Amino acid sequence: MTEEEVYYTRERLRMVEEQIAGRDIDDQAVLQAMRTVPRHCFVPRENRHLAYADCPLPIGQEQTISQPYIVALMTQLLILQGTENVLEIGTGSGYQAAILGTIAKQVYTIERHKRLAEQATSVLAELGLVNVEVVIGDGSLGWPEHAPYNAILATAAAPRVPQALLDQLADGGRLVLPVGSRGGQYLERWFRFGEKLHREQGVPVAFVPLVGKSGWSEESWNW
């Protein structure tokens, strides 16, 4: 292991103990995934010294890699057991997809920015995460091709939960996403029980917009 690898490993373990396990994250699979996935590989080189800091970071295209705690929290809310077919909306850097792929059976992740999708695909391949597939498209419409999904996670804020995502949620499935406006959002978790849906509202958060047919237009978000 190189000196750089030793440094990043130490910082990653410290991140988990101080920022994540030290709060309210107790899902052992989530904690282990956060200890394992090298977050610095998903951060632009100029910001890698901040890769394990308790904050979001810019990744280009006006997008961000989420704060580590939020990644862990949203993953924990999905209640993954390791057998799930998962859909992620908003690949971004690919870090959240990597965490999901470390725990779940199969992950499909949608990104509307071609350059980010290509970069994420490259990093995920380098890490050997063959169960994560990146596609380019409008995430607000989900990805019907591989539905239904046992878990759906959106890493961008919607004005309301897109009906397409609810429609693609399997019986017993969980959907986690931020809902609100530019001024702020709340995490929501939806459960499907047959034809019935149950919604829970969680903590306040701040995410970039889910731009798409069933999300925000760039003009309305910036108004």
Image (cartoon, rainbow, N blue to C red):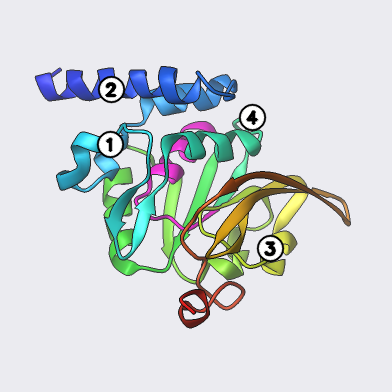
Mark carried by residue 161: 3
Q: Height in image: 46 above or below 52?
A: below
Q: Residue at x 50, y 18 (%)?
A: 22
Residue stretch rendered in magenta on the structure: 88-104
The residue labelled by disc 1 is 51
Query: Upstream in the sequence, badge 4 or badge 3?
Result: 4
Q: Label 3 sits on what residue type?
A: Val
Asked if the residue under mark 1 is in contact with the one under mark 4, i.e. CB atoms within 8 Å, the reply is: no
SS assignment at label 1: loop
Residue 29: percent from the left, percent from the top? 54, 24
Label 2: which residue?
11
Question: As drawn, which residue projects farthest toward the front?
Answer: 183
Judged from the image, the secondary structure of the residue bearing numbered disc 2 is helix
User: Which residue type does callout 4 highlight?
Assistant: Gln
Q: Is residue 107 above or below residue 127?
A: below
Circle 4 crowding by C-alpha within 10 Å: few under 14, some 14–19, many from 20: few
The residue wearing badge 4 is 81
